[in-house]
Image (cartoon, rainbow, N blue to C red):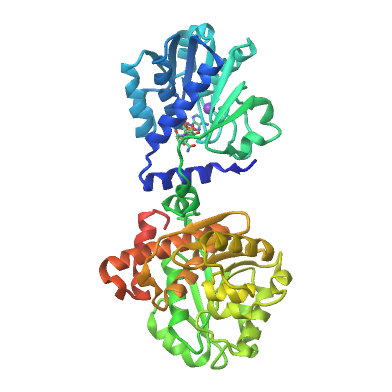
Amino acid sequence: MKCISSLRMKAIDRNCECLGLLLIQLMENAGAAIAQSVREKLESGRVLFIAGRGNNGGDAFVAARHLAGSSGYIVKLILLGKARDIGTKEAFHNFSLLKFSRVEVIEITDSSQLEAEASDWYSEADLLVDAVFGTGIKGKIKEPESTAIDYINREGRAGKTIISIDIPSGLDPDGGSFEKAVHAGLTVTFHRMKAGLMSEKAKEYTGIIRVAEIGIFADAEQYTGPGDLMTLNRRESSGHKGDSGRILVIGGGPYSGAPALAALAALKAGADLVTAAVPAHVAEIVASYSPNLIVRKLSSNILCPEDLSILLDLINSHNVVVMGMGLGRAPETLETVRRILPFCRKAVLDADALAALSGTIFESLAGNCDLIVTPHAGEFALLRDMRTPESQDSCIKAVREFSEKEGVVTLLKGKIDIISDGKQTLLNRTGNAGMTVGGTGDVLAGLTGSLFSRNPAFLAAACAAYINGAAGDLAFEKAGNGLLATDVLEKITEIIKEADIG
Ligand SMILES: NC(=O)C1=CN([C@@H]2O[C@H](COP(=O)(O)OP(=O)(O)OC[C@H]3O[C@@H](n4cnc5c(N)ncnc54)[C@H](O)[C@@H]3O)[C@@H](O)[C@H]2O)[C@H](O)CC1
Ligand SMILES: [K+]
């Protein structure tokens, strides 16, 4: 069964919100699913919800309200904490609605109060619903949560049904480890199976697992969105120069603008140090574009094998190589690209560097070098030696299969970008028709390299596609179809700042 990580789930929730499907709507559906599970387990009787102050508790507030509206149930709810300490506006809103429902509520702040005031609530209940923690658990379990879990388990041992919301409280949703956890008879988890529920150790705690649909729509999961950016590693606030990425851009020769755009985009996306290694006759031109660039002059007018020793030194002192922009396709240039690749640990290959990739090169690099390729449809056709399909579904299949076969991450650029590592695939629809202007692909390559220095290849490529397109959309507001690659470059920081990932 396909599992989902708690981080990915959070990204999807955020993407839903950005598309207009609010968390409170998902919470309503989650709570309704829990109420229905209670009804299926208990025809009538006393139901006790034990709720924490997070959104797992929020699901319980909704479920309690729904159940209290059905005849035959006496519903009580213990809130572990004070109402004012409820952590999210959605959970707080649903808690506030309980005063109009027939739900008796008690607020408990310490374990002695749990014993003195809520012990009877536990013992008289026919069924208990565990909403102490869901996917938001962190660190050692504090009080009164720890005692609340012990009390739930005591009632479980007495033969009562325990239903856990999303995950038995205490269990790590991803690894499945725990210090203590609720022993549930039924776990109702939302949207997708969580990896932690499937671990060997977790099995005796989850009881039967039911996956409930809560209305998340496919677009939030299939397309990149601000939620995906949230899952990127942040720059270390206490880091040293170079900790947030040292990027080596290898490009230029017939052209000078392309490597400069890639290098500046890498800087704008947060890399600490960017070196552009460019053929001799464009070195001064590239340096003149910006004082932010470190330019290393290569030996000739094009990239050639004589540059190998200087390049191998540079590769060793950088953590990502971004190669191809404006290199041209002279045979000695393509040969140099091929000879450099085995020395790269992480590389983004764009434009002319893609023309150097043929035959079994990917196979020979497997395990050594983490690769992202960023072709457009024409370059993708050359890479596969096959026409790029017209229909989107066939294209997605082709990108997925190519990535799996060659062991690379592919970012196929187009009206809708397709990003795949062979297992995961995402689409990106930010961007606009104005971005067909020259240079926006160079910006994307630099952005990708920058994010790749701090993140896994697939996430870096997907988020770079999103940021590049979103920056292009901002640029379009001012410049329309006359936008330039430098306009896109200027907007990168706005997107990154807005997403709070800088
Ligand atoms: N798409 C979905 O799947 C949806 C899921 N929902 C539910 O939301 C929870 C996750 O909610 P979150 O607010 O992120 O976290 P929790 O409620 O699990 O916990 C946070 C809560 O607990 C406190 N806390 C954390 N660690 C500890 C500890 N060691 N000791 C004591 N207290 C701790 C923390 O301070 C917070 O107060 C998910 O599981 C689903 O149930 C949404 O409702 C709908 C969408
Ligand atoms: K729970």
Name the residue at the left extreme.
478
Q: In the image, what residue occupies the spot 38% across and 14% down? A: 103
Residue 407 drawn at (x, y percent):
67, 63
Q: Is residue 80 visible?
A: yes
Q: Nearer the viewer, residue 404 or 251?
A: 404
Residue 323 drawn at (x, y percent):
56, 77
Q: Nearer the viewer, residue 485 or 490?
A: 485
Count of residue discs = 0
Q: Is residue 429 above or below residue 161?
A: below
**Relative to 230, 41 lies left or right:** right
Image quadrant holding the C terminus, namely bottom left
Residue 368 falls in image quadrant:
bottom right
Q: Is residue 133 above or below residue 493?
A: above
**Relative to 495, 338 lies left or right:** right
Q: Nearer the viewer, residue 325 or 438?
A: 438
Residue 409 drawn at (x, y percent):
59, 63
Q: In the image, what residue occupies the spot 38% across and 44% down? A: 17
Q: In the image, what residue occupies the spot 37% across and 64% down? A: 471
Q: Is residue 396 above or below residue 127?
A: below
Residue 128 drawn at (x, y percent):
53, 16
Q: In the image, what residue occupies the spot 43% across and 31% down? A: 29
Q: Is residue 109 visible?
A: no
Image quadrant holding the N terminus, namely top right
Residue 267 falls in image quadrant:
bottom left
